[in-house]
Amino acid sequence: MTETTHTTPDTARQADPFPVNGMDAVVFAVGNAKQAAHYYSSAFGMKLVAYSGPENGSRETASYVLESGAARFVLTSVIKPVTDHGRFLADHVAEHGDGVVDLAIEVPDARAAYAYAVEHGATGVEDPHEVKDEHGTVVLAAIATYGKTRHTLVERSGYDGPYLPGYVRSAPMVAPPEKRTFQAIDHCVGNVELGRMNDWVAFYNKVMGFTNMKEFVGDDIATEYSALMSKVVADGTKKVKFPINEPAVAKKKSQIDEYLEFYGGPGVQHIALATNDIVTTVRTMRAAGVQFLDVPDSYYDTLGEWVGDTRVPIDVLRENKILADRDEDGYLLQIFTKPVQDRPTVFFEMIERHGSMGFGKGNFKALFEAIEREQDRRGNL
């Protein structure tokens, strides 16, 4: 098994050619944004904070902004396509189903970030421009990445509104939980075609100055039937982490092959959400109807031998079907939902870190066997 870890010196921030403040938002194009917003409010415990729609001047789209700590989702659906943007969103949902169209990144200087990216080979899809309202000014620009996904570069230091100009504050759809379910976006995973992973890793290296954080190849992510390869790129501070997956040749169809088939091409496969209390998170989400992947009890029989002591006892991990992994820096706890729409495409990961900056390498076999069982039930293995 081969895993390579790349470290970044403390001085990297000062020399970073593409500094970032963190993830700004994960933007979804969906068939019915109002219903999707209700789902993420009730099932994920997120809080509706802003809205844009016909009632405040947006005749083409309706968008709902939900937050949990620093994590922000924007759910947009088309009311009646009029512009190229509206037609793009409508066509995206028709072709791909509900999915991520934008991994927006907050940057200290959107103009400089855009200029650097384009000078180093990025395709610009939105030139830098200012948008204003009574709350101040935001500078926006956007570049293309894999599939039809984009990165909007958001400079919002001069703005104190609820999200962006054009949005108004909104009351929560449902009463938010007493304790937030998660507090940040940990990483966002992209699936690309066979043979394209290294191209997109090189894209992030060159265009955004990201470094290679980890890679998993060969037997790292393989079962008896399927396999994939993955490399992780991150900004200099590790605030933004993008694993990139591609399928590998195996006996049967991998989860990446299934995603590419049903999504209709490359795109965002899953979003990992950071929590400080994964047990409460999982119990709360399960009670609200969220379905998680199951793992056999046998996984836990020897878990303590190689993971060691964790904050959560092994019997509690077993009860809640939570996975654990340990590396040289610490350990993590994680669990994965089933796809959150009818197409077997986008899903979520809940992750609780205790020192480890890994991605659960020790769990890959158990996790992917669990995914294969679901694929087999769908008739797609």
Image: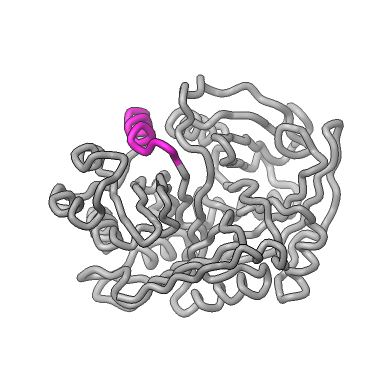
In the figure, residue 110 lies in which quadrant? bottom right
Q: From the top left corner, tell me how far across and down residue 91 is, in percent.
A: 60, 54
Span shown in magenta:
275-288
Q: Indicate whether 275 appears above or below 18.
A: above
User: In this view of the protein, which residue sits in the foreground, 147 or 244?
Assistant: 244
The furthest residue to the front: 10
Of 211 and 245, which appears nearest the observer?
A: 211
Q: Residue at x 33, y 28 (%)?
A: 287
As drawn, is 113 to the left or to the right of 98? Answer: right
Residue 344 versus residue 60 in the image, above or below: below
Please indicate whether residue 38 sits to the left or right of residue 132 in the image. Answer: left
Which residue is painted at 53% across and 47% down in the image?
Answer: 185
Q: Position of residue 97 (x, y in %)?
A: 50, 51
Task: Evaluate whether residue 320 shows in this view.
Answer: yes
Q: Which residue is drawn at 60% across and 58% down?
A: 237
* Residue 205 sits inside the magenta stretch: no
Of 329 and 165, nearer the camera is 329
The quadrant of the picture occupied by the N terminus is: bottom left
Question: Which colour scheme appears in the figure?
Answer: one colour
Left/right of residue 145 with respect to residue 272 in the rendered view: right
Q: How many labels does the image show?
A: 0
Which residue is more in the foreground, 318 or 120? Answer: 318
Q: Which residue is rendered at x = 18% and y = 39% of the image? A: 315
Please state the horizontal and vertical placement of residue 339, each as a whole percent of the image.
Answer: 38, 48
From the image, give the main secondary structure of the stretch colored magenta: helix
Quarter of the image with the C terminus in it:
bottom left
* One can see residue 75 in this view: no
Q: What is the x, y in percent for residue 269?
A: 46, 57
